[in-house]
Amino acid sequence: MKVLVNAFVVAVLLAAPDLSHAQSYPAKPVRILVGYAPGGGVDTTARMLAAALGELWGSTVVVENRPGAAGNIATEVAARAMPDGYTLVLCNIGTHGITPARFAGKLNYDPIGDFAFPSMIGGVPNVFMVHPSMPAKTLRQYIAYAKAHPGKVNFGSSGVGGSPHLSVELLKMMTGINIVHVPYKGAAAALADVMSGHMESSVGNLAGGPLGAIKAGRVRALGVTSTKRNPQVPEVPTFAEAGVPGFDVTGWYGICTQSKVPQPILTKLNQDLNKVLNGAALQKRLEAQGVAVTPSTPEQFVEHVKKEIAKWTKVVRDAKLPGE
């Protein structure tokens, strides 16, 4: 009995530092890395979440943009960060679905093994837009126009290999159109060029700039990539409704961190993320941007990530998109 008691005391003492860290967490500013330029849907979502967490914790939460390589730069920084819970990353369909599919075996980190997955944030469709002067009023008309002018129609996106870009690669595969991708350094720049008429068409996360541009009439939305219409733009049909049956690409956002962060801190992160995401204030703000809020358990989140990597591996292979 004495041996068992002593073993229990040792176990408690060993766990005590982690427990105390969790109770005092966060004791200094937390940063949320974003792998894209300011102004896009990922950045907007991160800033809303940072404000809500900062209010809950009574502490500073800073959004740090590290754009480049379709989110890969910020993701690698997060994977190599000190495992103390003070570096989070806004992971998404691009960083933890498409990029691992494109660069399988070539990344400097393991997209599953090097990360913990405290919680999903929610899902958001991409939206395909054209300048109002373009003759195509519907996605069907756009497809017909593209077929009549192969290789002559351009579309912009936030960059090579992101969810918006791959959405259109899938569209090209399913319809046989030949349109030319023009990658930008961020979603905001691509949207600005289609609003000004310098680019015929553009695709981006509905969250952020595209939603405001659609409502202001600066662009014409031809379709959303999800299987259901988005309540923020109920007049915009899905790709499936607009002539591409079976089309389904739903982007998603979540919070990831370094895999070796102590479990008590990961548990607190999950609890606090679920608390703010289930709160009416943040939910209303995110849903107003077109994000369907779906907080989760870490187990649910990592399972979703694994399925996304498998899905996009097939799309990347079929699209013959080269790894870089």
Image (cartoon, rainbow, N blue to C red):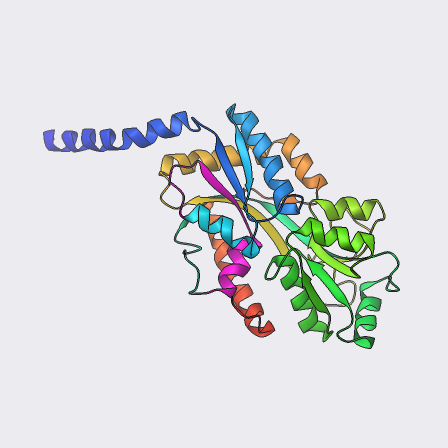
Seen from the viewer's position, the closer of residues 209 and 193 is 193
Image x and y of residue 318, in percent:
58, 74
Magenta run includes residue 192? no
- Seen in the picture, residue 40 relative to 102 is either above or below; the reply is above
* 300 sits left or right of 210 in the view: left
Image x and y of residue 175, in percent:
72, 73
Residue drawn at the location 54% of the way across and 53% of the way down: 71
Residue 229 in view of the camera = no
Residue drawn at the location 45% of the way across and 47% of the way down: 77
Name the image quarter holding the N terminus. top left
Image x and y of residue 130, in percent:
80, 58
Residue drawn at the location 62% of the way across and 49% of the way down: 123
- Seen in the picture, residue 160 relative to 275 is either above or below; the reply is below
In the image, farthest residue toward the left: 2
Q: Which residues are magenta?
A: 80-104
Magenta run includes residue 99? yes
Tell me how many marks there are.
0
- Quarter of the rendering containing residue 166: bottom right
- Seen in the picture, residue 289 relative to 95 is either above or below; the reply is above
Image x and y of residue 165, in percent:
65, 61
Seen from the viewer's position, the closer of residues 151 and 229 is 151
* 164 sits left or right of 133 in the view: left
Residue 111 in view of the camera = yes
Seen from the viewer's position, the closer of residues 4 and 241 is 241
